[in-house]
Amino acid sequence: MSAAEKLHAHPTATGMSAAPLVMEARGLIKRYGHVTAINGADFELRPAEILAVIGDNGAGKSSLIKALSGALIPDEGQIFLEGKPVSFRSPIDARREGIETVYQDLAVAPAMTIAENLFLGREILRPGPLAKLLKIIDKKKMLDEATRHMQGLQFAIKSMSQPVETLSGGQRQGVAVARSAAFARHVVIMDEPTAALGVREGNMVLDLIRQVRDKGLPVILISHNMPHVFEISDRIHVHRMGKRAALLNPQKISMADTVSVMTGAIRPEDLSADVLAH
Ligand SMILES: Nc1ncnc2c1ncn2[C@@H]1O[C@H](COP(=O)(O)OP(=O)(O)OP(=O)(O)O)[C@@H](O)[C@H]1O
């Protein structure tokens, strides 16, 4: 058993709560030459929660998320999914394990329909050996399933055969969120999903993220938007200098104090216990 696995096997010895975790990381390290982007980071994600990950520019949020989504291989440390140690060599590995990531850019293919976007790279083929051999796509089934899924998320769009380029920015981002919700089995990671959006559209995407959580999937939300973080998250992971500095309860701590923890103006050890999340 590796050191990290031992840590995981004795959670109370490290002061962790014994509650079940969907995803966990212990002691992640990633160095780029002289820069240490991840510096002994811990991470914990609970079932059906929205966990915001916040931090100043350069704090190492993206690097942490890349490690959790297979886009970066850490030099040290261990990631656990549903209690099992996992080692992702690529984002495809992470996807196979049920972790879906929505990136801020590269969200959708504009010329394709909503239904096609939902099944992009995972098209449903018509039944039968010939259809499989010729890779004949079952458009009707994809359309039906897309409609059913979008209705389940209360996504207000009339036709799933509409090209994505006819949608607003918020609706496009909504399609990306819905796609990740459709295929994720364990975790949805969202990197600044509302960054490029106006107020109404941002709120629409926040609603959709809540729906994903309410379906039972935990969401990791990386965001610089403090009002959004406070509106939607169940717990806040503050990342600072390459590691988790604090885990905060947005119901108890003010936005101003949260920003102070993020920038280092308040030291985590000076916080009162009631603002910490467990
Ligand atoms: N591929 C890389 N090569 C070299 N240095 C890197 C690389 N990726 C990240 N870094 C460095 O690691 C540190 C953390 O970067 P990271 O992008 O993870 O931070 P961040 O919190 O996501 O920042 P931002 O909010 O600005 O996106 C920074 O100093 C960055 O310059």
Image (tube, grey):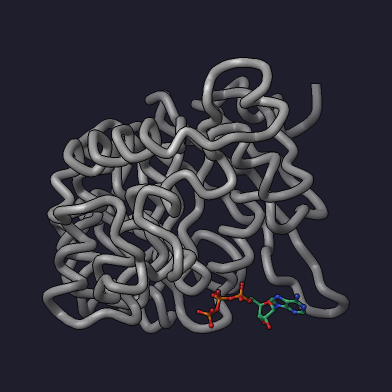
- Residue at 45% over, 69% down: 111
Snapshot quadrant of residue 264:
bottom left
Vertical side of 120 occupied by 243: above or below: below
- Residue at 52% over, 49% down: 120
Residue 80 in sight here = no
Residue 61 as seen in the image, left or right of residue 173: right
- Residue at 46% over, 58% down: 102
The quadrant of the picture occupied by the C terminus is top left
Residue 65: horizontal and vertical position, in percent?
56, 58
User: Which residue is the extreme one toward the right?
Assistant: 33
Residue 128 in sight here = yes
User: Which residue is the extreme one toward the top?
Assistant: 128
Residue 22 as seen in the image, left or right of residue 250: right
Snapshot quadrant of residue 78:
top right
Observer-nearest residue: 77 or 206?
206
- Residue at 57% over, 68% down: 62
The quadrant of the picture occupied by the N terminus is top right
Residue 20: horizontal and vertical position, in percent?
41, 24
Count of numbered badges drawn on the protein: 0
Q: Quadrant of ligand 1?
A: bottom right
Observer-nearest residue: 71 or 74?
71
Residue 166: horizontal and vertical position, in percent?
28, 73
Vertical side of 167 occupied by 231: above or below: above
Vertical side of 172 occupied by 118: above or below: above
Residue 183: horizontal and vertical position, in percent?
45, 37
